[in-house]
Amino acid sequence: MAAPDRPTTAPPIPRRAEDVTGAWLQTVLGAGGHHAVIEDVAVTPIGTGQTGATFRVTPRYGSGTTTLPATFVLKLPTGDDSIRAGVTLGYLSEVTFYTEVADHTRAPIPRCYHSEITEDGAEFALLLDDLAPAVQGDQIAGCDAEAARLAVTALAGLHGPSWCDPAWLELPVAMPKPGDTAGAGGLGDVARMASDMVLERVGDRMSAEDRETMSAALDLVGPWLLAHTDRYAVMHGDYRLDNLMFDTDRVAVVDWQTVGIGLPARDLAYFTATSLDPEIRAACESDLVDAYHSALLAHGVTDYSRETCWQDYRFGMVQGPLITALGCAFASPTARGEELFLVMLGRSCRAIRELGTLDLIRAAS
């Protein structure tokens, strides 16, 4: 059967589900070397859509055999203009990850079949493997030590291949890079502003200890970012359960809108501090650091002792209140969102106190 006529030039980026057609899918797949006749598509929404619109795309293939998947996941910008204005840098970061980083990482990630974005980042499309039947982690419920071990081992697959490679310092990212004094100072100012906004929004639902810890931690963001700049790698930036997909004894990492370059253990600390109940974290964090460190060595990292890894882990705990406060302060409020932010702030502030993170930062600066 001959393929039906399809446009040979690049079709416009879909703005909504109704714009996703068999013609569009066939054209973008063909541009990537994946040729098939696609007669029609079914498009259904999945996920929460908080910072983007995610859809499951089910093509109806024409006659003949194909090795292409039965379903894809398509990410488009959110339809909410008030949200879209604040997350275009995230869209740029995610497309950058799949176009410039993905082929160089050993982290388990979905395969990308197509990516495109406008220069201003306002319109984009990512066509990815559908990871079903894998299920998203539950940030509020947390996870057990076994799931956490899968997650931290996978994280080493991101950090290890990019470890201290100066080529990655050229990667265009929004967050300050090692040694960026102006960027660190600017983010420090934003962090203090976010701290005030969080206290105004949900401070009455935080304990006095957590309010004090969060404020103190975010006051130190500037010097924190400028310490230990001799150790860096590509970072996920928001490495937590909501951005992980679990399937039995496997995990895949998604949502790369906060990619950065910095102290790798910030990702590790952020995961354990925000994704584990404090009692579980305290009981298993030493073993998790061991697992992460061993996986780094397996990926070729040298001259990095387990003791240094542990100190970096303690030092990196500020990533928890930093990313959580930025989300709480600048995201559109929802009931679940506020509950999630409060849980993450409570867990990460307690970890900072128990691990003596603020004293480490003050000593380093």
Image (tube, rainbow, N blue to C red):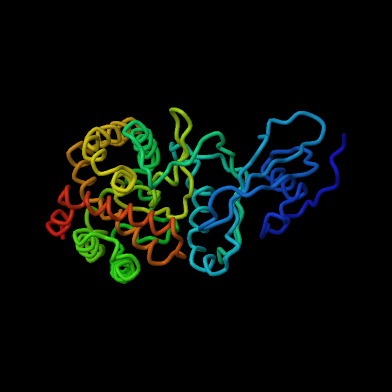
Q: How many marks?
A: 0
Frontmost residue, 29 versus 328: 328
**x then y, percent, for residue 231:** 27, 48
For the C terminus, the quadrant is: bottom left
Q: Residue at x 36, y 42 (%)?
A: 142
Q: Residue at x 24, y 61 (%)?
A: 214
**x then y, percent, for residue 286:** 21, 36
**x then y, percent, for residue 328:** 38, 62
Residue 102 vs residue 129: left or right? left
**Quadrant assignment, res 42:** top right
**Quadrant assignment, res 268:** top left
Q: Residue at x 32, y 48 (%)?
A: 274
Q: Residue furthest right?
A: 1
For the N terminus, the quadrant is: top right
**x then y, percent, for residue 136:** 48, 41
Residue 57 vs residue 340: left or right? right
**Quadrant assignment, res 300:** top left
Say if 157 sits above or below 173 in the image.
above
Frontmost residue, 129 versus 272: 272
Q: Residue at x 41, y 56 (%)?
A: 170
